[in-house]
Amino acid sequence: MPSIDAWRGDAPVVLFANPTAQSGKAADAIRTAEGLLARAGVPHRFVPTAPAGGTVEVVRQAIDDDGARVVIAMGGDGTFAEVAKGVLASAHAAKVAMGMLPTGTANDQGKSFGLAAGAGALADNVAVIAAGRVAAIDAGRIEVIAGQERVIHRDLFFDSASVGFGADALVARNRDRELVGKIPLARLFYRDMLVYAGAVVRKFAESYVSDVKFDLDAEIDGHHHSFDSLLDVIVKNTAVFGGEWVLDPDTRADDGVFELIPIYGRRDLTSKLFASLRHLPVDGDTLRDLGIEHSEPIPGRRFALTVTQPGQAGYPAAQVDGEEIPHGRRYLIDVLPRCLNVVVPRAATR
């Protein structure tokens, strides 16, 4: 009997995924996952994700109306976030366990817990779900404030929020993806990580000819920090960033704190990319020996971030968990400690 049954009770596990993702290739992966769940002795049913954020309500209904107590997010960090929001929107969040089958582009959540990603990892990841080991992880609550202290957006996030270069590259990626999707042959080859990489390279090149930097005043747990001429600022929960970088090796998704990571410019960004690449044997101390410094993360439980772009109208782009959000003058972020039960490998549990 799978150990996940202790959480599942009498209700089947509900698998949430988008069968039209990856130009329809996701449908094959979903069928494979269902077969693996059946062979592992895990009763389940499949429910497709809904567009335009509708997955949150679909998940809530599965829990509150249908009695589901184990749900699985199959996809990338965006799918993880939508399913997790549905869990927390339900009346039974403390009694629900959430599994992961990472098949997206970056898969920061899964990789931070030691899960591999993609179709080739499905068998191992289904075995993790069947084993039913659960860790309670943190979430972030964010409010975006425009002029006159008007809240224009409220959201939850589980991996990261950022303002600046990375979010701007995400916006460019989304526009490029829309254009590529209209070209039959191009959309077969130029998609997913390739599209994002192309947007990052273009935005990096543009930073040489246009001023994209901003200033930031930050109150972190009541302590004031001032940052001038930032290229980006990231507030991070999980260890892995962008699928391949570990910006702070000491961070944990269940430690009750997030880390603010300021990036001052192209030099700082480059040093972080080299120092934090998971498979590259170069660390921050090595870079400092070479005369390359970079800024360090600042931990906290409550962040009040005020952004200004001297000489420019408007504010830099913003994102949470790889999704665009409205950008504003201020961002208020609170850590919600250990509020989401996630099924993880044995090595990820204390």
Image: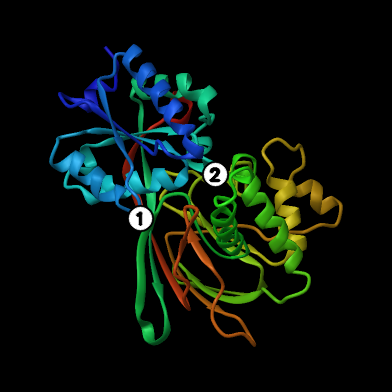
Amino acid residing under circle 1: Ala
Tell me if 62 is positioned left or right of 177 in this view.
Answer: left
Dot 1 surroundings within 10 Å: few (below 14), some, or many (20 or more)?
Answer: few
Which residue is located at x 14 percent, y 36 percent? 66
Quarter of the figure with the C terminus:
top left
Say if 38 sits above or below 136 in the image.
above
Tell me if 208 is positioned left or right of 223 in this view.
Answer: right
Give the label, 2 or 1, closer to the camera: 1
Quarter of the figure with the N terminus:
top left
The spot of residue 314 in percent (x, y) is 54, 81
Residue tagged by mark 1?
52
Examine the image and state in which quarter residue 130 appears.
Answer: top left
Q: Residue 3: which numbered mark, if any?
A: none
Residue 331 at least partly seen: yes
Which residue is located at x 50 percent, y 39 percent? 23
- Using the image as rendered, state which of residue 260 and residue 194 is in the foreground: 194
Residue tagged by mark 2?
239
